[in-house]
Image: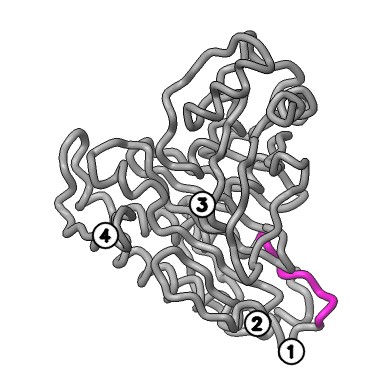
């Protein structure tokens, strides 16, 4: 049964797994008691649907092993943008803002609005994480959607259309990939499988001993998700990652039994005035002390 403050809210129909769901249009302020948490489980199917639909919008522009069919230009001197990025961003902003009209918004492809800093809840979105991969025909790109409350991710969805893999997590409830529960084992691979920028991998190997070097995953969000699914043991992250690169995957990793931290051991906080992070490490919780110790030595 829905709580009383939701029972009479307007509803929207969402098709999910052969069932129509009636999902409430949830406010963040106004009639909702400030102490009440959002009903994240009831939002999850709609956010999952949004990620799938965004992926469907991107796929016609994607050409496996070849240059994208989308128009391509650059922000600044080196950051690529395609018309697919903009189309997905427009769709997701409209769709997600319709679910939570008073939520703030932070996205790689939208001009930053400082009003988000006054909101408890904020959508943090990268419509295509791994635009370079997308544009060059590499399959490692993803749609990343996070809902953050007071600086902490409470709902994360990451969809990799070219791999047909959807990762999701809800704070305190677990993480899944294509419906299968993610739970990192107590012991990792020996030697540890490591992915990330070469200088960071070199540093880790010098101080921790032999590692198995995996190809760098061009989508940072997917690199972290693959730590969560156990296919990477240690994911290394260069300085200057943005909130939209990591907010969804951070929760997926944490709920699977892993940790994403900066090298001083602190966990990322989101929706700050400058949403930029330092060098980070993503790893199963059991391996974290040894791996971060090696990076700081």
Residue 226's label in the rendered image is none
**Tag 3, which secondary structure?**
helix
Q: Which residue is mark 4?
A: 74
Task: State the residue at coordinates (47%, 27%).
Answer: 198
Residue 245's label in the rendered image is 3
User: Which is nearer the N-term, disc 2 or disc 3?
Assistant: 2
Choose between 2 and 228: the one closer to the eye: 228
User: Which is nearer the N-term, disc 1 or disc 4?
Assistant: 1
Mark nearest the camera among 3 and 1 is 3
Q: Which residue is mark 2?
A: 27
Eyeballing the image, is 200 above or below 3? Answer: above
Image position of 26 (left or right of 212): right
Task: State the residue at coordinates (45%, 58%).
Answer: 126
Q: What residue range appears in magenta?
A: 34-41
Task: State the residue at coordinates (54%, 43%).
Answer: 167
The question of residue 37 being in magenta is answered with yes
Give me the C-alpha separation between circle 3 and circle 1: 33 Å
Give me the C-alpha separation between circle 4 and circle 2: 37 Å
Image position of 273 (left or right of 5): left
Mark nearest the camera among 4 and 3 is 4
Q: Mark 1: few, some, or many residues within 10 Å (few <14, many ≥20)?
A: few
Q: Which residue is mark 1?
A: 31
Residue 107 image point, x, y percent: 47, 66
CB atoms of marks 1 and 4 within 8 Å: no
Image position of 36 (left or right of 53): right
**Tag 1, which secondary structure?**
loop
Give me the C-alpha separation between circle 4 and circle 3: 18 Å
Name the magenta segment's main secondary structure.
Answer: loop
Task: State the residue at coordinates (52%, 80%).
Answer: 113
Residue 79 image point, x, y percent: 33, 55
């Amino acid at each position: 049964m829905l709580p009383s403050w939701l029972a009479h809210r307007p509803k929207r129909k969402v098709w999910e797994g052969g069932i129509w769901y009636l999902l409430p249009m949830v406010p963040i302020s106004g009639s909702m008691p400030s102490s009440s948490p959002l009903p994240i489980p009831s939002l999850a199917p709609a956010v999952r649907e949004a990620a799938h639909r965004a992926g469907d919008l991107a796929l016609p522009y994607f050409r496996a092993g070849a240059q994208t069919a989308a128009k391509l230009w650059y922000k600044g001197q080196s950051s690529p943008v395609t018309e697919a990025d903009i189309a997905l961003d427009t769709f997701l902003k409209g769709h997600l803002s319709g679910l939570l009209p008073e939520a703030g918004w932070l996205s790689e492809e939208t001009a930053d609005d400082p009003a988000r800093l006054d909101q408890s809840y904020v959508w943090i979105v990268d419509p295509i994480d791994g635009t370079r991969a997308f544009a060059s025909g590499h399959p490692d790109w993803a749609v990343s959607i996070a809902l953050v409350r007071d600086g902490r991710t409470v709902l994360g969805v990451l969809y990799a259309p070219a791999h047909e893999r959807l990762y999701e997590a809800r704070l305190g409830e677990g993480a899944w990939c294509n419906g299968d529960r993610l739970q990192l084992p107590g012991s990792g691979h020996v030697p540890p499988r490591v992915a990330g920028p070469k200088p960071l991998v070199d540093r880790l190997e010098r101080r921790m001993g032999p590692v198995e070097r995996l190809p760098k995953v061009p989508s940072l969000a997917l690199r972290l998700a693959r730590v969560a699914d156990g296919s990477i043991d240690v994911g290394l992250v260069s300085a200057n990652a943005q909130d939209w690169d990591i907010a969804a995957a951070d929760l997926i990793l944490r709920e699977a039994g892993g940790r994403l931290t900066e090298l001083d051991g602190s966990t990322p906080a989101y929706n700050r005035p400058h949403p930029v992070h330092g060098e980070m490490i993503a790893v199963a919780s059991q391996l974290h002390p040894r791996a971060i110790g090696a990076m700081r030595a």
